[in-house]
Image: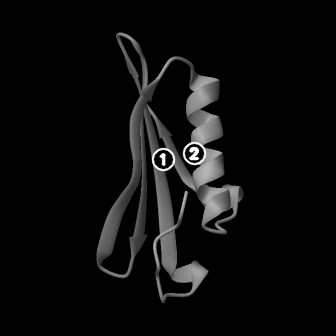
Amino acid sequence: MNGPSVDVPIDARTIRVVVDRVIDGYSLTVSITSGERSQVLTETTVSTFDEAEKIARAQATDIGFPWDKVAVICR
C-alpha cells in the first residue's frame, strides 16, 4: 500500500479508524486528515475485529504514523 503524498509534518496529520459491527462482520474505514484535506485510505468489510485492527495498523505503519497517535472509534 502506498501512502498519500502529504507535505505536512506528521504532527499536523490525524488518522481516524472507524470499526462498526455489521451483519456479516466488521466495517472498517481508515482516513487521514492533513490541514483541510481528508482522504479515505481504506474502506472494507472484514470477518473479524482482529482482521480490522491488523489492516488499520498496517495502513498506519505504511505511511509512518505511530499507532498510539491513531484515533480508533468502535461502534
Q: Categorize mark 1 by other alpha carbons within 10 Å: few (<14), some (14-19), many (20+).
A: many
Is 47 situated above or below 3?
A: above
Pick the residue in front: 32 or 58. Answer: 58
Which numbered mark, 2 or 1, is in the foreground of this view? 2
Residue 13: x and y in percent read: 50, 75
Name the amino acid, label 2. Ala
Q: Quadrant of residue 25?
A: top left
Q: Which mark is residue 17?
A: 1
Q: Is residue 52 left or right of residue 6?
A: right
Is 26 situated above or below 29?
A: above
Assign the C terminus to one quadrant of the image: top left
Q: Residue at x 47, y 79 (%)?
A: 5
Residue 44: x and y in percent read: 39, 35
How far is disc 2 from disc 1 in space, using C-alphas? 7 Å
Residue 69: x and y in percent read: 63, 62
Q: Residue at x 64, y 26 (%)?
A: 50
Residue 15: x and y in percent read: 50, 61
Pick the residue in front: 69 or 7. Answer: 7
Marks 2/1 in contact by CB < 8 Å: the verdict is: yes
Name the amino acid, label 1. Val
Assign the N terminus to one quadrant of the image: bottom right
Q: Quadrant of residue 52?
A: top right
Q: Which mark is residue 56?
A: 2
